[in-house]
Amino acid sequence: MLEVIEKSWNEFWAYYWRVDDRHNIPGISEWDRKLVSFIEHVCRLKPPARILDLACGGGDQAKIFAQKGYDVLGIDIAPPLIRYAQQQFSTEKLKGSFIVGDMREIDYNAEFDACVILSGSFGFFGDIEDQKLLCSIQKSLKKGGKVFVMFISANKPIRHERTWREMKDGWELGEGWFDAETSVRCGRAIIIRKDGTVIVPKEEPGYHANERIRCYTIPEMLAMLSKAGLKYVASYSARHLDVPPTPIPKDAIHNIVVGERKI
């Protein structure tokens, strides 16, 4: 008989998705390095600039920034991820710090040369809270500081789909769909171990495996940047990270925006 076990975000899911699962994606380390180089170029950054990495996960991109000589502060709501990031920096003797916290609660005043939100971590909170977050980011940036936001585009929504894949000790079953009325991408997943254990996400507020992520269009993102006092700089596609940027196909989905604090 299968045994069903509920796991909270901090007990299991955070570390699974952002460390164990992520590090098994083919080519992910190379993609991280390419992304960091792209951010450096489009945000015109040079060491020892100070970077605020929100929803930093296990610190994979933060580590690359630090290896290049940047001063990084990473914030994530999941204690297991912050511990992992701290261990990475300690092992390599890198300069940087990490804080367990909700990025909606940041309160900095003109302290950073750039702020990054990567890996689709923007959109978890809905229109009002997402707008407040951008306002807080604007306040945290120095004059001329840049914000680099990756988000999920509403221009190419996913179809309702069910997926499965084999893991080293079981199988992951997933389901995803797009709610057109709210422009929200929804998803859930369970893990079935070979020993008959079924791991499911525990119902709880905040981050958990049953995701609801607000998807945005470029015009929506531009309006939010403007409302936050950030000047729009450019938009890009996460599938085209060449340095220097090259013209991308006209049908490419833009899911990155860059803004700048002018005053």
Image (cartoon, rainbow, N blue to C red):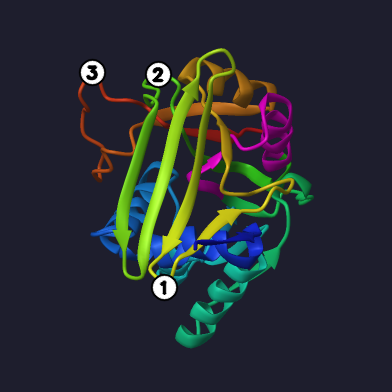
Query: Please, what is the three-letter code of the amino acid marked with disc 2?
Result: Asn
Across and down, in percent, residue 53 comes to: 57, 55
Name which of mark 3 and mark 2 comes first in the sequence.
Answer: 2
Where is mark 2, residue-wise?
155
Across and down, in percent, residue 250 comes to: 23, 18
Examine the image and state in which quarter residue 192 appears.
bottom left
Q: Residues within 10 Å of mark 2 (few under 14, many from 20)?
A: some
4 left or right, relative to 126: left
Q: Secondary structure at mark 1?
A: helix
Name which of mark 1 and mark 2 comes first in the sequence.
Answer: 1
Residue located at (68% from left, 57% from top): 77
Residue located at (33% from left, 33% from top): 237
Nearer to us of marks 1 and 2 is: 2
Image: 219 above or below 150: above
10 and 147: which one is in front?
10
- Give the spatial CA distance, label 1 vs label 2: 36 Å
* Magenta-colored span: 115-138
